[in-house]
Image: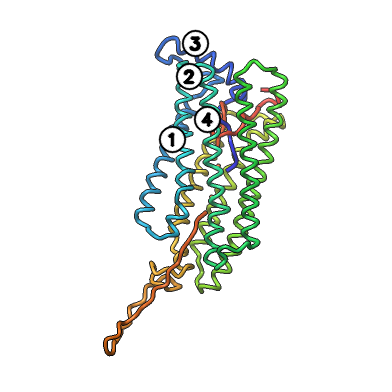
Amino acid sequence: MAPKGGRGGGGSSSGGSSGGSGGSSSSGSSGSSGVCEGAFVGPTGVTIINFVAYCLFFVLMLVLLISLCCVRKRHRSASTKQLIGIVYMLSLCSTLFAWALMIIFAIVRECGSGDYNSAMGLSITCSIFFNLGTFLLLFLAVWKVNSMLRQRLGHTGKFTLHKIISLVIVIVMAVLTAAYIAMNSYQTWSNYSPSSRTFRNDFDIHLYKYWQAYTGLWVVSVVFGLMLNLHMIHSLKSKVHSSLSDLTFWSCILTFFLVLYPIIDVIPLSAGLRGHFIPRDTQYALYYLSNFFQIFAWASMLFLAKSRSWEIAAGDGYYGGNANGVQQPMAQQYTYGNGPSQSTVGAGTAQGYNYQQQPEYLQHNGMPAAPTQGYVR
């Protein structure tokens, strides 16, 4: 997906940018009792709904990781292992680690068991890992799937138009993601430092607008990647004389979730920039929806990876080498003299395929905090 924030989130905009300084001081007073008295109830801190979200999505990411191991064990085809290989594992593990840091950050902040530097460090680290995980998901969706389709069309090693376009998309989004991580890290640092309030507000506005533009480019990139993939799937249908329907279906489902969740993410931010207030309960609902849809995107990749259409398109002997994926009975063979009978089995090879959240306000993976009262938080 698109990148998101780095600090916790769920309520008001005041928790977004002022959460670094004002929030930490309040947590210090609550931590003085030694038992986190009053934790997760402050108006600008991490609420209990936020904390439940961090724990819930951490568990769901863990379930996805376990599911990945099961799929790789049961589906031993080259296509499955390459599509949900090291890049997919890094994407899951990076996001899982970021959610774990979010849980730690919430406890440290609300219980007052850390200082400004530790809170700032956790926030920036969360942003980096969330953005890394989601970019790798984009990489899989736009480049890896495209690469596997090109291989089945016999375009391996050739600089085709499909390859050039998908490569340009990945490089551009990588540069924009790196720039966003740097800007968001600076925003987090400024929230924890005694810099000019006016300057911080101006910088935040530019960061919000950059985030909106990034989300738009993210959506365009994903949709364009799907168009390239569908064009190659159509060419494969004629080649293998098979509908490849499950490959088409899961490619579309994956694209649907990759487009939907960043759009939901950016709604509160866009409303805040226009001076429109979104009720806190609505922000919570959007936050949960966005992250559920991101989970569904990773799950869709699993289903896409174990699709039989990859082996059908490759003519892989794993499914009998039949274009329709149905194993044919072995014909009886006769030998004359001492010559050995011979049989050949077609073999295919494959390659593979490719989101962050916010601070203080429902923001956990790198997205800046959305203002709810105009431009000032």
Residue 175, quarter of the rendered image: top right
| Residue type indicated by callout 4 | Thr
For marks 3 and 4 on the same chain, the one whose residue lies earlier in the sequence: 3
Residue at the far left: name it: 338
- Percent from the top left, x then y, of residue 49? 48, 28
Dot 1: few (<14), some (14–19), or many (≥20) neighbours within 10 Å? some
Residue 56: mark: 1
Q: Name the residue under label 3.
A: 29
Identify the amino acid type marked 2: Glu
Give the label, 3 or 4, closer to the camera.
Answer: 4
Asked if 171 appears above or below 22 in the picture, the reply is below
**Alpha-carbon distance for marks 1 and 4?**
20 Å
- Compute the Cα span from label 2 to label 1: 19 Å
Amino acid bearing label 3: Ser
Residue identified by numbered label 2? 110
Mark 2 and mark 1 lie on one chain; the one further toward the N terminus is: 1
Task: For marks 1 and 4, give the one nearer the viewer.
Answer: 4
